Image (spheres, helix red, strand yellow):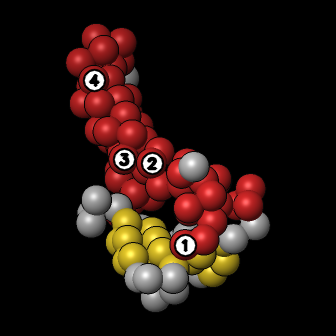
């Protein structure tokens, strides 16, 4: 999915570049819960019950999308065919995985 990561597949290498939007959404949902708790201090439980699906459903969706990438990277790491560079929190130098294609053929078989 182009919103959370970019995947470029060449003939010898797969490059996966993670984007920072994932971290910002998690922080946004956390701040949303905190602000609701502070605004409605006396009625926190009923409001929290209403907002929980609005927080859990997007986070579950994000987790499902990123799970495919994480499984692919984990399998390639077991084979020792991954180069990791960058930082998760940097917009100018994002976290980048470079996976050799030979390792992907071994993983699929």
Which numbered marker is on residue 90? none
Residue 78: x %, y % from top left = 74, 56
From the image, tell me which residue sits under label 4: 53
Measured in 3D between alpha carbons, the distance from the residue under mark 3 to the one under mark 2, in whole angstroms, is 6 Å
Between 106 and 26, the one nearer to me in the picture: 106
Measured in 3D between alpha carbons, the distance from the residue under mark 2 to the one under mark 4, in whole angstroms, is 23 Å
Q: Verify CB contact (< 8 Å) between mark 3 and mark 2.
A: yes
From the image, tell me which residue sits under label 3: 65
Mark 3, other Cα within 10 Å: few <14 / some 14–19 / many ≥20: some
The residue sitting at 48% across, 75% down in the picture is 14
Whether residue 96 sits left or right of residue 61 in the image: it is right
First in sequence: mark 3 vs mark 4:
4
Secondary structure beneath dot 3 equals: helix
Mark 1, other Cα within 10 Å: few <14 / some 14–19 / many ≥20: some
First in sequence: mark 3 vs mark 1:
3
Residue 39: x %, y % from top left = 30, 33
Measured in 3D between alpha carbons, the distance from the residue under mark 3 to the one under mark 1, in whole angstroms, is 21 Å
Say which of marks 2 and 1 sits in front: 1
Secondary structure beneath dot 2 equals: helix
Residue 106: x %, y % from top left = 62, 58
Using the rendered image of the protein, determine whether residue 27 is visible from the camera's viewpoint.
Answer: no
From the image, tell me which residue sits under label 2: 68
From the image, tell me which residue sits under label 1: 101
Query: In the rendered view, would you say 12 is above or below 99?
Result: below
Quadrant in the rendering for residue 91: bottom left
């Amino acid at each position: 999915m182009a919103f959370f990561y970019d995947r470029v597949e060449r003939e010898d290498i797969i490059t996966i570049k993670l984007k920072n939007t994932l971290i910002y959404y998690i922080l946004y949902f956390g701040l949303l819960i905190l602000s609701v708790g502070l605004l409605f201090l006396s009625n926190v439980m009923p409001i929290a019950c209403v907002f929980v699906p609005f927080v859990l459903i997007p986070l579950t969706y994000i987790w499902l999308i990123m799970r495919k990438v994480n499984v692919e990277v984990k399998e390639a790491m077991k084979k020792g065919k991954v180069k990791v560079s960058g930082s998760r929190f940097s917009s100018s130098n994002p976290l980048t995985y470079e996976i050799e294609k030979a390792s992907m053929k071994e993983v699929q078989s």
